Amino acid sequence: MTGGVGSVRTAAWLFPEASATAMVDAVVAAEDAGIDELWLGDEGPSRDPFSVLAAAAQRTARITLGVSVTNPFLRHPAVTAATAMTLNELSGGRFVLGLGPGGGMALDPVGVVRERPLTRTREALRVIRAVAERRSTDGFAPPSHGLPAAPLRVVIGARGERFNRFASGSADGVFLGGIPRSMLPDTIEWARSVRPIDIGIHVNTVTGERQLEHLRPALIWTLADAPALTRERLGIDSAQLDVAIRALQSGDDSLARQVVTDDVVHQLVVVGDAATVTAGLHGYISEFDPDTIGLLLHPDGDPVAAIIAAGDALRAVNPVPA
């Protein structure tokens, strides 16, 4: 554990929405800004985060590169492991694989139903570990042309109790993103229930009202994939949520904006300039003592500009002594 403000790693997360070239430039900008970790989301049929990070690995030397989170439904876990290990080779050991159950944004467009998500994620991690260690397990036998054994860091990205207790016993860490602040004490307790794995807290952040209103309807996916307990504590009506999601998928975001109230936003988003964001992150660090503190960035334009702004906030998290 970090021991408080002054020793925490910093991170930024982006969904690969912009062009692949722009995303690679954003990773380079993150390293230039002194950010310790850069994560790309994996939400199914969009720009492939592994490919973007493979290109970025050739233009960076220090920053940790992560995908968070991929899921066991759209890629076979042995292929996921081989891809991750290849990226780890290309980056000189700087890659981290985030694994989770997948959500509606990734699975709905291809009609995949998320069945037995915890069981499937457990099985996926078992296979991924076997591939990385070049050993046999149920469902995988190392082929003669397989990769040599090599360390591979795997973290779990999920929000519920069972997933975080599973991570505590089996993973290298947890990627805690999109979790209401009021739920973090319980979530971190679950993640530390078996052994003290690394805790990464990643907070939605926007610079002002325009960006907030751009983000607001998209937060419906965070609520849709949240555990029932989280929705209950936020006062979310499940029937209203389902109707809002169907409307959003049809291009109407008005109902999503109604569901994502200002109270919900307050639980999920830090809004303000770099100084405001830094102060907010210090609050998370002081209260929850994570190993990593990160920003979930939602640029409605240039991702490089978003990273530069994030760097201003994150550099102040660990001030350099005068």
Image: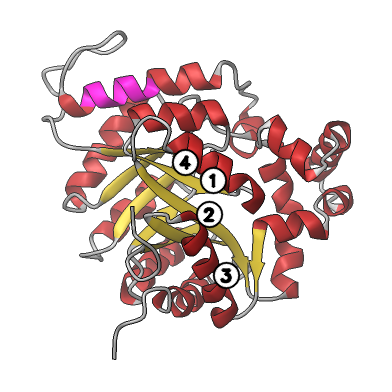
Which of the two labelled residues, at mark 3 and mark 1, occupies the earlier sequence position?
Answer: 1
Is 316 covered by the magenta stretch?
Answer: no
* Residue at x-position 83% and y-position 32%: 238
Q: Quadrant of residue 262?
A: bottom right
* Circle on res. 15: 2
Disc 3 designates what residue?
280
Above or below — where is 201 with respect to 117? below
The residue at the far top in this view is: 138
Which of the two labelled residues, at mark 3 and mark 4, occupies the earlier sequence position?
Answer: 4
Q: Tell me where the magenta segment starts and ends, as one range.
A: 124-131
Q: Secondary structure at mark 4?
A: strand
The answer for how far apart the CA atoms under marks 3 and 1 are is 31 Å
Which of the two labelled residues, at mark 4 and mark 1, occupies the earlier sequence position?
Answer: 1
- Number of numbered discs present? 4
- Badge 3 density bin: few <14, some 14–19, many ≥20, Cα 10 Å: some
- Residue type at mark 3 is Gly
- Residue type at mark 1 is Ser
Which of the two labelled residues, at mark 1 and mark 2, occupies the earlier sequence position?
Answer: 2
Q: Quadrant of residue 257?
A: bottom right
Q: Position of residue 103 (x, y in %)?
A: 60, 34
- Residue type at mark 4 is Val
- Badge 4 density bin: few <14, some 14–19, many ≥20, Cα 10 Å: many
* Residue at x-position 66% and y-position 37%: 226
